Structure formats: C-alpha cells, structure tokens
Amino acid sequence: MTQDELKKAVAKAAVDYIAPRLERDSVVGVGTGSTANFFIDMLAELKNEFDGAVASSEATAERLKSHGIPVYDLNSAGELEFYVDGADETNEHLELIKGGGGALTREKIVAEVAKTFICIADESKKVGVLGEFPLPVEVIPMARSLVGREIVKLGGDPVYRDGFTTDNGNIILDIYNMDISRPIQIEERLNNIVGVVTNGLFARRPADLLLLGTSRGVESIARKDS
Ligand SMILES: O=C[C@H](O)[C@H](O)[C@H](O)COP(=O)(O)O
C-alpha cells in the first residue's frame, strides 16, 4: 500500500470511530496536515449529523468550510468530545512530535480542550524514541537568537525555518539531534525558555487513541493509562 492509501485508511477508521458517538450538537476538533485532510474530506459525508468543527489552522478552517462544515471559534465552542489529528512521530506511549506543517500551537490548544485525542498516522510515524524528526518550536520573532542559544544549551541544533510564518505571526525553529528520551521533561524545559510560544512535543497531553495504518490493516492502540 502507498503512504496515501495508509493515510486514507486511518482517516476512515477515525470517521468510523466517531460516527456512532456523535450527537447533533457535537463540535469536533480537527487537526492539520495531509492525513487530517483525508479525515476532513470523509467527515464531510457526516456533516448533517453533527454541529460543526473547531480548526487547528487557517488551512483546515478553509477546507472544512469548502465542504460546508461550520467552523467555530474555540472560545465559543465549549467542550469538544474529539480531536482528530495526524503526527510526525509517535512512540509506544502515544507521545508525539507534531508541527511539521507549523500548526503545533493551535493543535496543542485544541487537543488540550478535547476529551479524546485520536491520532491518525501511517506506520512510518511509529518510532522507538522520539527525535529523528526535527522538533518544531514556535518562537516570537524577536526572540529567535535568544531561544536558539538556549536550545543549544539543552543539547539541540536549532535550524530556522526560513520563509515560514505561523498562523499566529511567529517563526519556527526546528531542533535536530536532541535527546528526547524523556519527552515530558524536554517539553517543559523548552516551554520555559522566554520567547517560546510552544513546542511540538505532545507528551504532557499525549494522544488517547492511535489509529495506525499498516500494510496488515489499521491497528487501534489505546494509551495504557487513558
Ligand atoms: O503542523 C502540522 C501537524 O502537526 C501535522 O499533524 C503533522 O505535521 C503531520 O502531518 P501529515 O499528516 O501531513 O504527515
């Protein structure tokens, strides 16, 4: 199977999971990226069975609206039953690296609000230890050099994502060669650097359910303590 076929399979598995659990007044949190896009396109078929969505990026909001799915501001949406999103990496504890597309901050905010975070990913995203994929950090532009120096002190190699601006008007530093064997600790340390908005580690708030696309089918992996 191609990677896109695996992404479509997990998107369908997510729709199949939430469909029987949706109420007419449900608002669904929706992530960003190519896997999330397949999910959005399939979610559209259910659009008369739930109220609408909260988007984790401008791109996702546009795609939802193009299908006629109402998009709500998170502040007026109240509680979200589900947040469905892809990932750049996941470990066995469903701790994630996200933000390859630069949407990490809004993704983290929406994930925080949702009762159940469903991660959809193809098997190339499953790793033993996080960090092969460079870890994105969203930074206030004037703090770029300061944050870069602090990241070096933590043992990482920050690289400025040239020409990229987040939906929040900030920049991204991608960290290479960082030891992420203790994800919660690294997530907190990076977030403590002045000028960091947030980083792409989802360890404090990991996924609750991983739908992993493999050549043998979609594996459903629940977080052990969820
Ligand atoms: O900022 C982007 C998001 O965190 C995506 O969920 C992540 O990059 C995975 O994207 P894709 O599904 O395209 O591999």
Image (cartoon, helix red, strand yellow):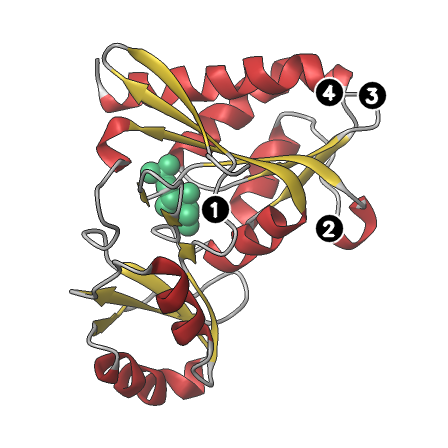
Q: CA distance from mark 1 to mark 4?
A: 22 Å
Point out the frontmost of discs 2 and 4. Answer: 4
Quarter of the view holding residue 90: top left
Q: Could you say where residue 109 lies in the image, as x and y percent from the top left?
A: 60, 55
All told, the count of numbered labels is 4
87 versus 76 height, above or below: above
Quarter of the view holding residue 47: top right
**Ligand 1 shown in quarter:** top left
Q: Could you say where residue 32 lies in the image, as x and y percent from the top left?
A: 48, 42
Looking at the image, can residue 161 be seen?
no
Residue visible at 22% across and 81% down in the picture = 152
Residue visible at 69% across and 28% down in the picture = 69
Going by the numbered disc 3, the residue's amino acid type is: Arg
Going by the numbered disc 1, the residue's amino acid type is: Pro
Residue visible at 83% across and 21% down in the picture = 24
Residue 72 falls left or right of residue 91: right
Residue farthest to the front, as pictured: 225
Q: Nearer the viewer, residue 96 or 61?
A: 96
- The mark nearer the N terminus, 1 or 4, is 4
Residue visible at 22% across and 18% down in the picture = 2
Going by the numbered disc 4, the residue's amino acid type is: Leu
Residue 21 falls left or right of residue 144: right
Residue beneath disc 1: 206
Q: Secondary structure at mark 3?
A: loop
Q: CA distance from mark 3 to mark 1?
A: 27 Å
Residue beneath disc 3: 24
Q: Nearer the viewer, residue 58 or 90?
A: 90
- The mark nearer the N terminus, 2 or 3, is 3
User: Which quadrant is the C terminus positioned in?
Assistant: top right
